[in-house]
Amino acid sequence: MGKTAVVNELHKPIVRQRGYFIKGKFDQFQRNIPFSAFVQAFRNLIGQLLTETEAQIQQWKNQILEAVGENGQVIIEVIPELEKIIGEQPPVPELSGTAAQNRFNLLFPKFTKVFSSASHPLVIFLDDLQWADFASLKLIELLMTETKYLLLIGAYRDNEVSPAHPLMLSLSEIKKAQATINTITLAPLNQIQINNLVADTLKCTEKSALLLSQLVFQKSHGNPFFATQFLKVLYQDKLIKFNIDLGCWECEISQVTQQAVTDDVVEFMAFQLQKLPQSTQHILQLAACIGNQFDLATLAIVSQHSEIEIATYLWKALQEGLILPTGNIYKFYIGQENQTFTQANSQTVRYKFLHDRVQQAAYFLIPEEEKKTTHYQIGQQLFQNISKNKRAERIFEIVNQLNYGKTVITEQKERDELAELNLIACGKARSATAYQVGREYANMGLLMLGENSWQRQYKMSLALHELATELALLCGEFEAMEQFIETVIAKVHTLLEKVNVYRIRIQANASQNKLTEAIAIGKNLLQQLGVIFPKIVTEKDIQTAIAEINPLIGDREIENLVDLPQMKDLEKIAIIEIANGLMAVASISGSPLFPLLVALSVKLSIQYGNTSASAMAYACYGIIASNTIQDVNTGVKFGQLA
């Protein structure tokens, strides 16, 4: 009930105090886009930064890179617009799910702290939290406990949130972390307040406004948005008129009472939208399918019209106040005479619906039997017309539309293509540490592949099952994880193809403190790959394993091992990755296998080349060299090598 308007009033005093006020909105049609409101908010902030001088932008770039180091790409994966400030960043090593999550949890608060200081505090407003994705809720928990000079304001509809809703669970976790939470509940306006609103609007006494305000209250039930829209419609229908002779506004109460006006705000707004030209209605319907915010370029793609045509169609909705521009550049898109400018313009022209209820009303106008087809056609147009280098950046947007319309697909070939797109989206969600969202994409991909997928799409089936297995683990769904593992073990052709799911099973056992079981699974898997450890590890076994390393190094300097070629032997890569997965388990459990696993990984790296797992092995060997064989110099060098 007016929650967004209340929060927006904070903007002016915050800016006066040299603070940054940024806002984002979760969307009912974009729940599967990780961090969508954060992306909007920081896109807004980056837009503010880009208006500053080149010297100031360079200063921001330096501060951001100092905070995130060589891991800038991790943040760019979530907020692509950041690249406009810090430039292209080197790829980051791919980490396991937990390690990737830890890296993100370390980096994002550091990134946020760049903009949160005593001299310029940061306020982030996140609207419609009832539609927030799981990853965003976890990020809110993290920021609320990690970042100073940050005020995070959230708004949600309490009538759409139960005690078991993920948002309520996140708020409970934040309270446990001793973060300060203040809750303001906005009730509907009462009849006196509605009377004040009507009197202020018509510049008349409260007594004169009483009859009209009673009608407004009856229809709006105290909803301020509905109340103001109702008054606006009465004015447009000439039922509220200004009497020049008397110098006041007058209302034809008898005619108003005769009007059959629904008291459902969505139906009411849908009726108002139907007064617009058909071309405008059609574009608004497409916009509603896209989200609360939309841009000209995307609408041009999905409607197969030019951006100038789309801007012209939207003009009437702009005049009626049903949509709002998010900047001033939209003005240049009205009229064919601006064709040259618009072709040269690189800025994105964005709009947003005045209110969720307007978006819902526009969506309501699409016949129910056409909704899924509309979504699917939008997805197809985006996929076909967005360039390949931009497609990865917008994969969630494309796949969500296609998934909404999946039931219209009749050919298995199309289902397989959608499964592949869900696989890409799943991988991107995993990289962004949005594991719950990633799991939904994996499940959708498997659903699209359907029966006999292992015979028809073997590689894709394996890839989707592997991701689904890992994401089930990361979401704590151990039963589902085991089902995926058993399916892979039963279906794949080779032992190497089973390695990834066995590694996940090791991680799952370790995460449940079943350390003995985890080690047993790993030893059995290594044995199948030809690596056999003694049943009882002796000190002699450890000394022998360590003694085999120096001869392999030979006369090379330890620091030069960084120049070893990339390991290509798939079996050796599997062995070192399994050994690395077991190292932490062995270390925690105090197993004597730990030095043997480290020595194995170091020897394989020196003999067959480095992998991303070699760094861990070198670091652990540095510890062993320093502590076990008392060679601190070698230990330091291996630590530096790692």
Image: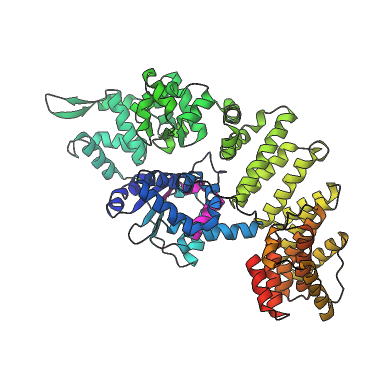
Q: What secondary structure is the magenta-colored segment mainly?
A: helix
**Residue 452 placement: quadrant:** top right
* Residue 593 rendering spot, x and y as whole percentages: 79, 73
State the extent of the magenta-drawn residues as a range.
125-142
* Residue 22 rendering spot, x and y as whole percentages: 39, 48
415 displayed left or right of 325: right
161 displayed left or right of 571: left
Q: Is residue 203 above or below residue 430?
A: above
Task: Report whether residue 282 is seen.
Answer: yes
What is the quadrant of the N terminus in the image? top left
What is the quadrant of the C terminus in the image? bottom right
Q: Residue at x 35, y 49 (%)?
A: 7
Q: Is residue 310 magenta?
A: no
Instruction: Work out whether residue 348 or residue 457 is closer to the camera in this orientation and state it.
Output: 348
Task: Report whether residue 2 is seen.
Answer: no
122 displayed left or right of 520: left
* Residue 78 rendering spot, x and y as whole percentages: 53, 48
Q: Is residue 188 above or below residue 166?
A: above
Q: Is residue 566 above or below residue 531?
A: above
Instruction: Work out whether residue 121 or residue 225 is closer to the camera in this orientation and state it.
Output: 121
Residue farthest to the left? 245
Q: Is residue 129 magenta?
A: yes
* Residue 468 rendering spot, x and y as whole percentages: 70, 49
478 displayed left or right of 336: right
Q: Residue at x 74, y 45 (%)?
A: 463
Instruction: Work out whether residue 630 or residue 307 is closer to the camera in this orientation and state it.
Output: 630
